[in-house]
Amino acid sequence: MVIQLNIHVWHVIECSPRGRSVWVPCILFGAHSHVNDQRHSSCCTDLLRGCLGSSVTSAPGTSGNTSTAREDIDECSLTASALCAYRCINTPGTFNCICPEEGYVLSPNGRNCTDLDECALGTHNCTSAETCFNVQGGYKCLSFECPANYRRVTQTRCERLACQDYIECQTMPQRISYYQLSFPTNIRVPANIFRISPSPVYAGDNILLGITGGNQGMHFSTRRLNNYTSFVYLQLPPRGPGDFLLDVEMTLIRHSTATKFIARIYVFITGPAL
Ligand SMILES: [Ca+2]
């Protein structure tokens, strides 16, 4: 038997191997909503009639009761959390998923929202002196500044020009490097987010790592893997989306000489994927 759902009813009941029934959107079965799988047909017939009542019709050419009733079902209220990743809009006879007005486009499955990469699309408004960095639901315009007595060697790296004496050479970072990363608020903690190690590594190298700025709320900390490898990690779950610019200082002790390096890490915590 082929059961055809009335086109105004966008749900079908799926019969699981254990005999339980669950609501699933008809879209999973295609636009025509045919339930022609033998796995479904035997047990779903009665369930469909029982739950959807007069809205179920039999396909032409098959036996069965036929009704022309057209009662709208508010799919959004029935399964509000399951149908749409962001927001469900009920309409007569069906429903639509929508996405936030900016930063997303509806995914091909009609339920999820895909982030727009404004940097790749060229729809950002960053200046020519800034670098565009794509994040979930938006983008960031970043500027990588080199302080006095440093020269820019790449777009994201500054090298110290000179140091006057031994003390200054020990305390003034030799290099300042910029990095950027992003993750959603529902990240599981603790989570390593950044690995730091000298390159290349020599026998006897030892590094000390510390966060010297930007760690509002003490969300981040450092931990050591071995003498020459450490991590910056997220130790507290984010309370919501937020931006950080962490200053992470690495002191490399090599052949009894200490050299400082600074990693400036932009961290963008965004809302969860839609
Ligand atoms: Ca984006």
Image (cartoon, rainbow, N blue to C red):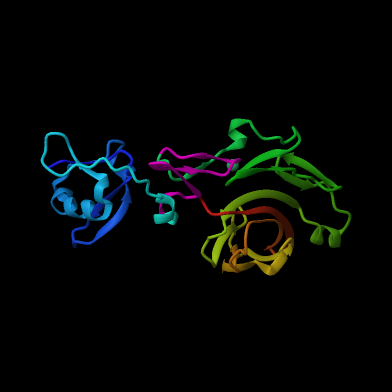
Q: Quadrant of the N terminus?
A: top left
In depth, the one of 133 and 242 nearer the eye is 242
> What's the magenta region?
82-108
Q: Quadrant of residue 151?
A: top right
Quarter, ligand 1: top right
Q: Is residue 155 visible?
A: yes
Query: Residue 55 magenta-drawn?
Result: no
Note whether 210 is above or below 32 in the view shown.
Answer: below
Q: Residue at x 60, y 58 (%)?
A: 197
Q: Quadrant of residue 247?
A: bottom right
In depth, the one of 211 and 227 nearer the eye is 211
Query: Residue 95 magenta-drawn?
Result: yes
Q: Is residue 228 visible?
A: no
Q: Residue at x 76, y 53 (%)?
A: 174
In the visual, does 51 lie left or right of 104? left
What is the x, y in percent for residue 97?
A: 46, 44
In depth, the one of 104 and 173 nearer the eye is 104
Q: Residue at x 85, y 53 (%)?
A: 163
Q: Residue at x 85, y 59 (%)?
A: 168
In the visual, does 164 lie left or right of 173? right
What is the x, y in percent for residue 128?
A: 74, 32
**Name of the residue lying farthest toward the right:** 164
What is the x, y in percent for residue 255?
A: 68, 63
What is the x, y in percent for residue 102?
A: 61, 40
